[in-house]
Amino acid sequence: MSNATTSVPPPTRTVATRNLGLIALGGSVVLALLGLFFTAEDVDQGSSVRIMYVHVPTAWVAYLAFVFTAACSAGHLWGKKHSLNLDRLAGASAEVGVIFMGVTLVTGSLWGRLSWGTYWQWDPRLTTTAFLFVTYVGYLAVRGLGGTHQQRAKRSAIVALFAVLEIPLVHFSVLIWRSLHQEATVLRPNGDVTMDGLMLFTLVFGVAVFTTIFAWLVLHRNRVLALLDAVELRGIDAALAARRAEEVTP
Amino acid sequence: MKHADFIIVSWILSFVPIAVYAWRNARQARRLDPFVDEGDKPWT
Amino acid sequence: MTVSRIVAVARAVASKDLRIEWRSRVMTNQVLPFAAIVMVLFAFALDNDGILQRVAPGLVWMATLFTSLVVVQRSFAVEAADSAIDALRLAGVPAQGVYLGKVAALVVQLVVFEAVLAVLALILYRVNVDVHGAVLLVTTCILGSLGIAALAAVYGGLSVAGRGRETLLPLLLLPAVAPVLIGATRATESAFGSDGARVAEGWPWVGLLAVFGAIFLFGGTLGFGPLTDE
């Protein structure tokens, strides 16, 4: 018998998640075809625009994951049930977010090398992204601190909310800081290309595909996190049962 | 490194890490599934 | 849980912390020399008088941040020994009071450190400060310390009680404190006159530090209790 108060019955792999995965996979293939072959090169950026077709979606997903984590954290803290489901969703989303954040930084750096000639610039967007990456990693470390599941949930939720608070502060400080250096953004092309037709479609399509990938990943990771929690509770139950069994025998 | 190399590396990096993550997650799920009652598993 | 009770608790916690420090002299005997040696090592690493003078503000605040890690660790280690904080919470002492008391004690200690570091910068890095700069500098130190302390007290509460948590504090605190670092160094640049910065340019940054400090203090007062509920 288990004390687990988590979720509802059903089988391990639903049709819905299977389909979601297939859509994600199919979409990725289409995206690759579009991004790498069927779209033309950009007038200004040349072929380096092809990196944008993955860089922009991963950046989008990274921030989406972060917002989702914060929303789930808030839902856990202020919801009546203090749902552990929401806590696990927050954790799964953060893990996926860290991966996408890291990828975004690297692909952005590669794009920068092609477009600006340097692997890094201290502009607010990049700097805030790097900052977020480290903050996420810290959040995941806090999730690993142990204690009861409710303790973990409350602790992590507060850290997540502090992290959200930091984002505008960091972005703003870096913005003012760099404005002191008056960087000639006119000379330096940024990622905001004006696209039309197939290129724009590919970009938006990429965002849709990666959002689907995000949803699929979070659902499956959330499932494993729930399994981990359930196993842990079982272990505790078994230990308690063994202890009680000891007490009964005189 | 040519432009093409940068592009290929970017695309690989955008898909391979998450594929590895998904695969490891699935492996963990397979390991844990037998130990948890059906009633305690989430709907996915 | 009235305001006056919170203030009373805060005052008690702050004076306890400062009294512990005064009697043990750990800060003065160990951490201060540490801060001083950090300043000297910067000179070894950078090996250029002109550059040292220019980057002195950054060095002072980086040294402050490193020092704050040590100070906060100690501040909460004192509580963890014999589970003093748990006893306080069980006795129904309001967490906000404990938090504010901790912050107050940290601010006092940090300001003392910054004073020493600033003097060292004057001597070692040959920085010059006039009266106006000094006023700016003192204000910057107080408000910068407030921001650092407000955040450090929150994450410091998490980082004690063993199990490999000590390394968590730098990872959580340093990114969070970045806005304070930016504001404090820019203001200090104006105070020191580094790179042609004038004192008047520093005051907007001080305003920013005040805003950060207020935000972090507010967030910390709300979050400290639930965060350290064990």
Image (cartoon, rainbow, N blue to C red):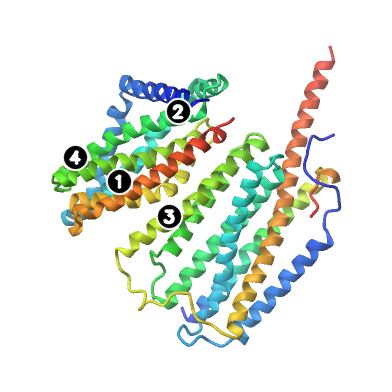
- Residue C40 vs C202, above or below: the answer is above
* Distance in Å between CA atoms under marks 1 and 4: 13 Å
Chain that bears disc 1: C
Residue beneath label 2, please? C77
Mark 1 vs mark 2: same chain? yes
* Distance in Å between CA atoms under marks 3 and 2: 30 Å
Q: Position of residue C11 (x, y in %)?
A: 39, 24
Q: Secondary structure at mark 4?
A: helix
Q: Residues within 10 Å of mark 4 (few under 14, many from 20)?
A: some
* Distance in Å between CA atoms under marks 1 and 2: 24 Å
Can residue A8 be seen from the camera position used here?
yes
Chain that bears disc 2: C
Residue kind at label 3, given as amino acid type: Val
Mark 3 vs mark 2: same chain? no
Q: Which mark is residue C119?
A: 4
Q: Which mark is residue C61?
A: 1
Residue kind at label 1, given as amino acid type: Trp
